[in-house]
Amino acid sequence: MLDCQARTGIKRSYEDLSEDTNLSIETIKSVASRKEYNATLKVISLLSISLGVNPIPYFEWEEINE
């Protein structure tokens, strides 16, 4: 949300994003505030499109040692 605001000068609210993406406000708040929240690719895609940002820089990869 901050990247979108910095780029466009427009502050988007949770309510606005919820209406635009059909995601619940609670889901959007969880993505924004809970570091360990495991959002689905669908959620990430909907928010990225709505905000006009590339989601790749925000992905974190964890290697699994088997």
Image: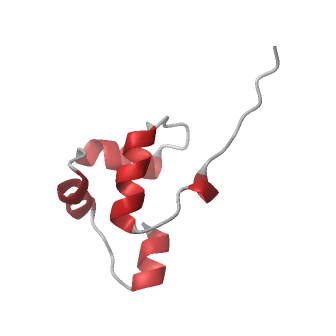
- For the point 21% across and 64% down, the residue is 16
Q: Residue furthest left?
A: 19
Q: Residue furthest bottom?
A: 9
Residue 49, compared with residue 25, is above or below; it is below
Asked which quadrant contains residue 30, the reply is top left
Q: Position of residue 54 (x, y in %)?
A: 52, 63
Quadrant of the frame with the C terminus: top right
Q: Position of residue 50 (x, y in %)?
A: 33, 63
Residue 56, compared with residue 38, is above or below; it is below
Asked which quadrant contains residue 42, the reply is top left
Residue 31, compared with residue 55, is above or below; it is above
Q: Position of residue 2 (x, y in %)?
A: 46, 70
Quadrant of the frame with the N terminus: bottom left
- For the point 49% across and 37% down, the residue is 37
Q: How is the image coloured?
A: secondary structure
Judged left or right of residue 22, residue 48 is right
Q: Nearer the viewer, residue 15 or 44?
A: 44
Q: Residue furthest top?
A: 66
Asked which quadrant contains residue 14, the reply is bottom left
Q: Nearer the viewer, residue 27 or 43?
A: 43
Instruction: State the count of labels.
Output: 0
